Image: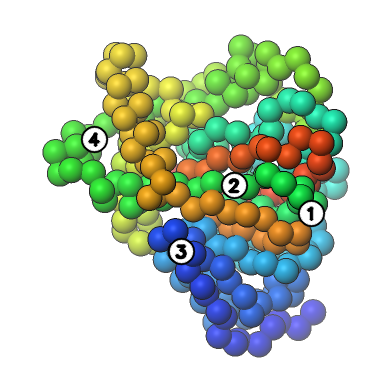
Amino acid sequence: MAATLAEPITVTPQPSGFGAQVTGLDLSRPLDAATLGQVKDAWARHAVLAFPGQPLSLEALEAFTLQIGPFGVDPFIKPMPGHPNVLELRREPDETSKNFGAGWHSDWSFQKEPPAATLLRSEVTPPVGGDTLFADCARAYDALSDGMKALLAPLQAVHSATRAYGTQGAYAKETQARTMQIIVSTEAEKTLTHPLVRTHPITGRKALFVSPTYTVGIEGLTYQESHAILGFLYRHMTQEQFIYRHSWSQGMLLMWDNRCTVHFAEGGYDGHLRVMHRTTVAGDVPV
Ligand code: SIN
């Protein structure tokens, strides 16, 4: 299939101060190098890119993902049949279990090399609810005092999937039926550390890299000490001034940067079907 011609894409920043909408592209065909460069530049600048009107097949979603970078590894959720790198985030109208992703997190931050990007495409959007909220962890870091930045600089945060996917975690205790096939495992109970403040490999900006879903403590600090610092940071980074609220339309692709944002999938659509297709792009060891 022929590559699309290099045309300037239109990048419209969201009023929230981060995130942007990108139009003037057909993502069902391979992008030429110049256009792909424009997309990557816009992504580095805005962190969350929305591409409306992209009715992509699963194969096209996979192909565009691979233009951004190699697939990441998605643990604990059964992928789509025949598409080992695509997750279907599906919630049926009669489901009553908590919607997937309903807690602030950066995707798979408990991995040694957490994914740089997540791509999420809306297949079926409910008529109400189902927004995805993003917090800008670089702007949140910038807004801290020099004293707090100095305090955080040497700290290593401890990450684990245990609260969600561990054998005593939220999914293990769930009693309501769920369409998505979650794999609860002792693997999820492992921990590893990442710098609490990480530096973005492309922009060089520092960002808070912690979340209430996957950060279980701070190395060398007591539970109470970690809890106090992390609690302050979660309240700080999820203030209105750092949030972009993304409202979906059918056939929209969203690509976000897990290295400098956290996100939260809002519910509010009980009684309605919501279907999303998700891929990840591999990332680096956070530094
Ligand atoms: C997620 O990847 O955390 C889910 C986001 C969403 O479904 O809006």
Q: Nearer the viewer, mark 1 or mark 2?
A: 2
- Secondary element type, mark 3: loop
Disc 1 residue type (three-letter): Glu
Residue 230 in the figure: left or right of residue 269: left
- Secondary element type, mark 4: helix
Ligand 1 location (quadrant) = top right
Q: Could you say which is closer to the camera, residue 33 or residue 177?
A: 177
Q: Residues within 10 Å of mark 3 (few under 14, many from 20)?
A: few
Dots 4, 1 in contact, CB < 8 A: no
Estimate the spatial distance between the alpha carbons at disc 3 and disc 1, rounded to whole Å. Answer: 26 Å
Residue 64: % across, % down: 68, 65
Disc 2 residue type (three-letter): Thr
Dots 2, 3 in contact, CB < 8 A: no
| Residue holding disc 4 | 152
Estimate the spatial distance between the alpha carbons at disc 4 and disc 3, rounded to whole Å. Answer: 30 Å
Disc ID at residue 15:
3
Q: Earlier in the sequence, mark 3 or mark 1?
A: 3
Disc ID at residue 132:
2
**Mark 2: is the Cβ under 8 angstroms from ligand 1?**
yes
Disc 4 residue type (three-letter): Leu
Q: Earlier in the sequence, mark 4 or mark 2?
A: 2
